[in-house]
Image: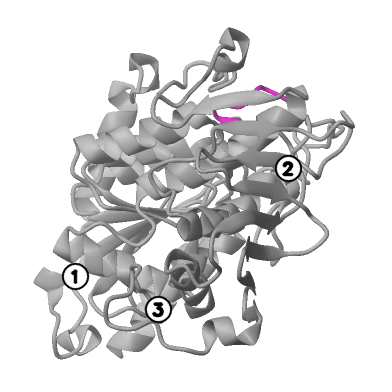
Amino acid sequence: MTTANRFTRRKFLQTTTTLAVAAPAILPSSVWGATTGPNDRITLGFIGVGKQNRGLLNGFIHKPGTQVVAVCDVDTTRREHAKQTVEKYYAQQSGNGAFHGCEAYADFRALLARKDIDAVVVATPDHWHALIVVAAANAGKDIYCEKPLSLTIHEARAMVNAVRKNGRICQTGSMQRSSREFLKACELVRNGRLGKIQTVVVGVGGPSKWCDLPEEKMEPGLDWNLWLGPAPLRPYNSVLSPRGVHDFFPNWRSYREYSGGAMTDWGAHHFDIAQWGLGMDDSGPVEIIPPEDPNATTGLRYRYANGVEMIHDSSKGGVTFNGTEGSIHVDRGRFEAHPESLAEAPLGDKAIRLYASSDHLQDWLNCTRSRKLPICDVEIGCRSVTVCHLGNLAYWNHRRLRWNPKTEQFVGDAEANTWLDRPKRAPWTL
């Protein structure tokens, strides 16, 4: 983070004063259960407490051996609601009738400055992910970051580098890997049940577009400048940041300044499963071919070095693996094999077995203790979101692209290599 982003002396003194009284209250041993105690707990901070992180908060707060000690959001109502949720839950658990041990912050840097926080859960809009994750890794925090991992290809690699440099554990929130139907499908593919894989069809929506929303009147209680952060300065619109506590996913995902559209939002789930099934967690395609129609938002094709072709087709959800011996279609709560006999016989003792997790959140907590890589480690998240970004770049620029997954550079296309990142609004920089 640049010098311009550091706290002023006044802000630093205000922060340290807060920290002096913000040490997490110790809950009674009955809250921790038989196998954990205060010294074993993982203290958590939540950054960006909109709809998605409220769900994650509800999941993590019930996990044994955790304590939520801080929440952060640029919207006053959201962060105060999250703080009250935490304190109400712990008050009920402790039986004391009151609990005051969760601090609320408007600026994520103040939360990361706390030495008593072990790990953070990040669910901000996508354009903030890289800056927060890199800062968190540099602050010595373990990280759970929602998918899609980044806004650009360069950001994703910077996140991996920061996590590795600081020896942190980082789970990407592509939680389909912790669902049994996806594990089953990918293990069957990896063990050759479909014969030679010929095509993979991934069903997600299309790319994002530049933001064209009109200006709306600002209301008090939102730090709009901090919501925008590294994104270009523009007037407020409630489509991007609906005010207060709401129970829907805001549509900032549709705009290029903040996200990659459904190609990254759902693509970070389904392209991720395609990569898993193909054994490409440390690699990716070598060619990206857009459809002939420059206005098309579906029909893009990826080619891998082994000859497999992956097709983006939004007409059907999920992932379909097609091989010489049959096909498997998998989606949330749905598994279909054609013919059905492909999935009937057990794989056997010598079969390839993939990482098995039945709980994405618990898997991350387990790994923060064991220091083993989680099921959707930051490198995997980087590779999967890179596939999504490559597709968007081909759609947006209507250009056939050749890609080197080892160097993470476009081959023979200097202009395309300028698309790997985008400028950030001062003073924000990685």
- Look at the image and give the residue range highlighted in magenta: 228-234
* Secondary structure beneath label 2: loop
Camera-side residue of 162 and 329: 329
Which residue does the numbered mark 2 point to in the structure image?
A: 219
Camera-side residue of 74 and 375: 375
Whole-number angstrom distance, CA of label 2 to CA of label 3: 43 Å
Mark carried by residue 41: 1
Tell me whether circle 2 and circle 3 mark residues in contact (CB < 8 Å): no
Query: Residue visible at 53% across and 83% down?
Result: 343
Q: Residue 350, position in %: x, y? A: 27, 76
Depth-wise, is mark 2 or mark 3 nearer the camera? 3
Sequence-wise, the earlier of marks 1 and 2 is: 1
The dominant secondary structure in magenta is loop
Whole-number angstrom distance, CA of label 3 to CA of label 1: 22 Å
Query: Which part of the image, by quadrant, shows the N terminus?
Result: top left
Query: Residue visible at 19% across and 47% down?
Result: 115
* Secondary structure beneath label 1: loop
State left or right for residue 2 relative to residue 30. Answer: right
**Badge 3, how many Cα within 10 Å: few under 14, some, many 20+?**
some
Sequence-wise, the earlier of marks 2 and 3 is: 2
Which residue does the numbered mark 3 point to in the structure image?
A: 358
For the question of whether residue 21 can be seen, the reply is yes
Vertical placement of 170 versus 405: above or below? below
- Indicate the quadrant where residue 17 lies: top left
Vertical placement of 369 versus 279: above or below? below
Q: Residue 387, position in %: x, y? A: 56, 41
Whole-number angstrom distance, CA of label 1 to CA of label 2: 39 Å
